[in-house]
Image: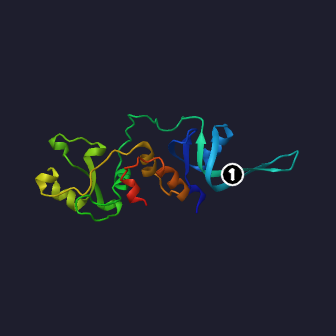
Amino acid sequence: MEIDRLQVLRTDASGMPLEWIGYQEAAKLYYLEQVAYACGSRICTLHGGINAKSGVRSLLDINSILATYSHSGGYKVNQDYLPPLSNQALFRRDNHLCLYCGVRFANGELSRDHITPLSQGGEDIWNNVVTACKRCNNHKAGRTPEQAGIQLLAIPFIPTHAEYVYLQGRRILSDQMEFLKAHFPRKSPLHQRIS
């Protein structure tokens, strides 16, 4: 696997997932003495310079999960946290399924549908949007599902912070996935989708 494509899951010192960072940012956190502990698998070893006195080359192992002392640069985690809405995260939340016809599509064939259309006072928020194929979205148009005579296959939900971190991940390693899943609510629909 190409090292530039690897992601490190950064958490706070209590283990709460914060964000994805690259190995370079992880090395910087070690240098700044912000790493409380590391867990997960070793994803790479960085080779530094050679000490002139000892002749020993410095090495730094980067693990897949790093707990840090500082929240700087991360997302604010609190009870009122509302993750930003993006099509990438929405499509991943809904498992790339059109929630009207139930067929899985590639990103380019999907669209964001407002259950209660904006023209009828609906909002562009997590619990009013679902993934829809372009055909179903065009058929529904500016109507509610009831007005269009179609049915939603799942109820939309607002992801928690840990769920949102998962939705933002590109190539999630198995140890990172297990760590994240442990932070999902018990009744999270994502448990069934990623098992």
Q: For this view, does 147 lie left or right of residue 171?
A: left
> Mark 1 is on which residue type?
Asp
Q: Position of residue 150 (x, y in %)?
A: 16, 58
| Nearer the observer, 4 or 35 | 35
Which residue sits at x=56%, y=39%?
A: 14
Which residue sits at x=51%, y=54%?
A: 178
Q: Position of residue 172 (x, y in %)?
A: 51, 56
| Residue behind mark 1 | 61
Q: Position of residue 40 (x, y in %)?
A: 60, 53
Number of marks in the rendered image: 1
139 up-or-down from 68: above or below: below
Q: Residue furthest front?
A: 186
| Nearer the observer, 190 or 76 | 190
Q: Position of residue 128 (x, y in %)?
A: 25, 45
Q: For this view, does 20 lie left or right of residue 86?
A: right
Quadrant of the image occupied by residue 106: bottom left
Badge 1 marks a residue whose secondary structure is: strand
70 up-or-down from 165: above or below: above
Q: Residue furthest right?
A: 53
Which residue sits at x=24%, y=59%?
A: 134
Picture colour scheme: rainbow
Q: Quadrant of the C terminus?
A: bottom left
| Nearer the observer, 187 or 80 | 187
Crowd around label 1: few <14 · some 14–19 · many ≥20 (10 Å):
some
Q: Quadrant of the N terminus?
A: bottom right
Which residue sits at x=32%, y=64%?
A: 105
